[in-house]
Amino acid sequence: MNGVVLISGSGSNLQSIIDNSDDINLTIDCVISNKANAYGLQRAKQVGIPVCTIEHSQFPSREKFDQELSNVINTYNPKIIILAGFMRILSTEFTKKYCGKMLNIHPSLLPKFQGLNTHQRAIEAGEKKHGVSIHFVTEELDGGPIIAQSTIEILDDDNAESLAKRVLIEEHKLYPKVIHWFTQGRLKFKNNKAVLDGKIL
Amino acid sequence: MKSLALILFIYFNNVLAFEPHTANYQLSINGINIAKEIRTLHELDNQYFYTANAETSGVLSLIKDYSIAASSIFSINDKGVDGVNYQIMEQENGKVSKNRAIDISSKNNTVISILTKTQPKIITWKAEQGNIVDPLSLFLAISYDLTNKPNQKDFYYQVANGKSIKQHHYQKSKNVDIKINNRTFKTIKVDRMDSTNNKSQIYYLTEYRYLPVIIKQTKGSKKYLYKIKDFKISEVEKLQVTF
């Protein structure tokens, strides 16, 4: 199955997807970043994947940026759109276009800690558990059905950095697995719900 | 530590308008302790990310599992604090009961809602010219103006909260010594001037870039009191203060 990956930063999740792409039947047609200095672009170039930068700061509104992003994505006609640390809230129009084939990974146990800086916030809130969630992206900010979560314990001596490292390990394991479900046709989006092997998750 | 106990050393980076920090507040309503609230400020890519997370504490937490999380992304321009995005989410017993999110653009004079389960329509509000803040960044907008406009007494803000945009007028009133855990601190009191139903009094610590230490709000018959318990600059070795 062909797809595109959207990133904003170092692209460690992108790397785990690239490393597993053969095993999960995924061909990455393009890696798109909203930041020119995102290291993930280098990771893609190293393995010959085309890259594209669309600087969000060059656009007067979210809608205009999303329109350009959509134009680029559509040139590849992807069957799956993978958000891997893409740090932008997407407009309703954009998410409607790709509803059912756009996945996102978020470093918290949703619905807790939407937004940024999730590890520090989880520690400060006195949470005992933390983790990562993968969900379909829908037009509602909180509406995308959760497909899978991986949970880890927050240790007494954890700080944001140590916790992030341990969550990242889970991210790198979980995301390729979920993408594989999708490329196999086992994971679908039906009636605003995530369905795996015919069962609502 | 119940009193001002530890100042390792004070370090303020003059380049940043705000110093990233974490502050813990005790929230009481009509004199009853209800929740603990943690506010954190971080800087990222020339913008600031300010969050407030509160959940029921003490005996109340046994009766009701309730939490509220708000986050604000804002930048600084020549007029002061300028909002970018705001979200507030309430959860009861692990389920989202309210979730409102907005994109703020002072450049376009607009505030646009983001769809959520509890906000099923996109609404666009037209704002007046000038900066727009949200209910969270408002506190730091005042801090910023107290720091950067020391001779100014009256401050006006457009505040968007996902339901409306309202003009707020605040006035610097007087220096007040306040006691927290038997220690006295110098503060500046700021009053909201333009609302009889929503009264606000905020006490800003004259040290530490006018950090809000006490926030009193009256909404109808309910009196909300946020009182700071401690705070620390993000890198602990720089500064840590416990009240």
Image (spheres, coloured by chain):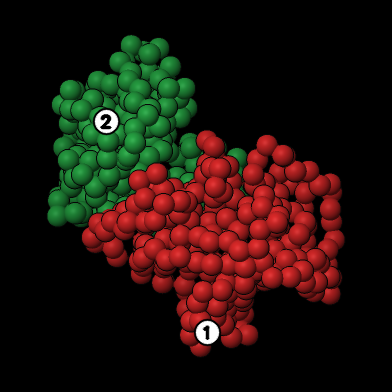
Label 2: element kind: helix
Task: Kindly identify the residue that appears in the image at 27 percent across and 30 percent down.
Answer: A69
A110 left or right of B58? left
| Residue type, numbered disc 2 | Leu
Q: Check residue A128 in the rendering and tell me which mark sits there, or answer none.
A: none
Residue identifier under label 2: A69
Q: Tag 2: Cα neighbours inside 10 Å, few (<14), some, or many (≥20)?
A: many
Residue for badge 1: B222
- Tell me the amino acid under the disc marked 1: Lys
- Secondary element at tag 1: strand
Q: Are marks 2 and 1 on the same chain?
A: no
Where residue B64 appears, as percent x and y from the top left, is 47, 78
**Toward which corner of the image does residue A107 lie, by quadrant?**
top left
Give the number of callouts: 2
Query: Where on the picture, by quarter, is residue B178?
Result: bottom right
Chain letter, red: B
**Vertically, is B176 above or below A65?**
below
Quadrant of the frame with the C terminus of chain A:
bottom left
Label 1: few (<14), some (14–19) or many (≥20) C-alpha neighbours in 10 Å: few
| Residue A25 % position (x, y) | 23, 25
At x 45%, y 40%, the residue is: A170
Residue at image position (32%, 39%) is A61
Q: Chain of mark 1?
A: B
Extreme bottom residue here?
Answer: B221
> Residue B138: x, y in percent?
54, 59
Residue A148 versus residue B53 in the image, above or below: above
The answer, for residue A3, to whether it is visible in the render is no
Taking the image as shown, residue B40 lies to the left or right of residue A25, namely: right
Give the drawing colour for chain A.
green
Q: Position of residue A86 (x, y in %)?
A: 38, 35
